[in-house]
Image (cartoon, rainbow, N blue to C red):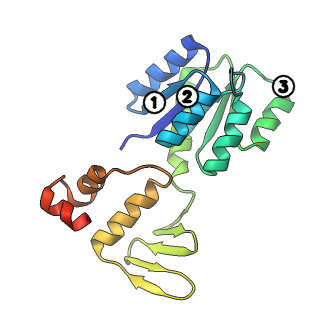
Amino acid sequence: MNARILIAEDDTNLGFVIEDHLKALGYEVHWALDGEAALSQFDAVGFDLCLLDVMMPRMDGFNLAKAIRAKDEFVPIIFLTAKSLEEDKLKGFEIGGDDYVTKPFSIKELTHRVRVFLRRSGNHTKTGEEILLGKYRFDTTNLKLSNADQKIDLTQIEADLLKLLSINCNKLVTREEILVQIWGENDYFKGRSLD
């Protein structure tokens, strides 16, 4: 599954260039022209990375970042802005931004920043072959789910399903995606196993 990137940018020329470039690299890109539309898309789709302009109509990038952080504390947020004062940069970091790129910028540099954050963002809950899920530890190698009180042995299918859902945390995973990812095909009889 390709990484999903949200762009919130009211400059149509810049937004088009960024969207076109990232799509050409294989990313699934959603572009909103204002903060409110971007937040609606974030709620509907769920994203792996957000590129936010600071100065936008209806909701600025800082308020949008606060709203996104309230819903997902791990999704990388990169601010794209003409505001280059140190106080603006610090404000961006204080409210949960991960990076702050001032305009004008190189599209190649932005692409590299996106790749770095996407590479690292999947690791926020993982430690080696273990995934932390709230108070539970999921050992992907030994197929065990445990907390302070108990250990549960999982079947391979259960472990694969749990891993798929944890990787896609805060995202909608369709029944069809689960069938293809876990069983290899969307088949009626295999689908009954999922039910």
Residue at mark 1: 29
Q: Residue at x 24, y 56 (%)?
A: 179
> N-terminal of the two: label 1 or label 3?
1
Q: What residue type is labelled 3?
A: Leu
Structural distance between the alpha carbons of marks 2 and 3: 22 Å
In the drawing, does residue 191 fall left or right of residue 50?
Answer: left
| The C terminus: image quadrant | bottom left
Location of mark 3 (residue): 85
Question: Which element type, helix, strand or loop, lies under badge 3?
Answer: loop
Under circle 1, the secondary element is: strand
Answer yes or no: is residue 167 visible.
yes
Q: Establish if 15 lies above or below 131.
A: above
Q: Which of 126 and 9 is in front in this view?
A: 9
Which corner quadrant of the image does residue 53 belong to? top right
Marks 2 and 1, the one that precedes in the sequence: 2
For mark 2, give the secondary structure: strand
Which residue type does callout 1 highlight?
Val
- The disc label shown at residue 7, or none: 2
Category of crowding for the residue at label 2, using alpha-carbon neighbours closer than 10 angstroms: few (below 14), some (14–19), many (at least 20) = many
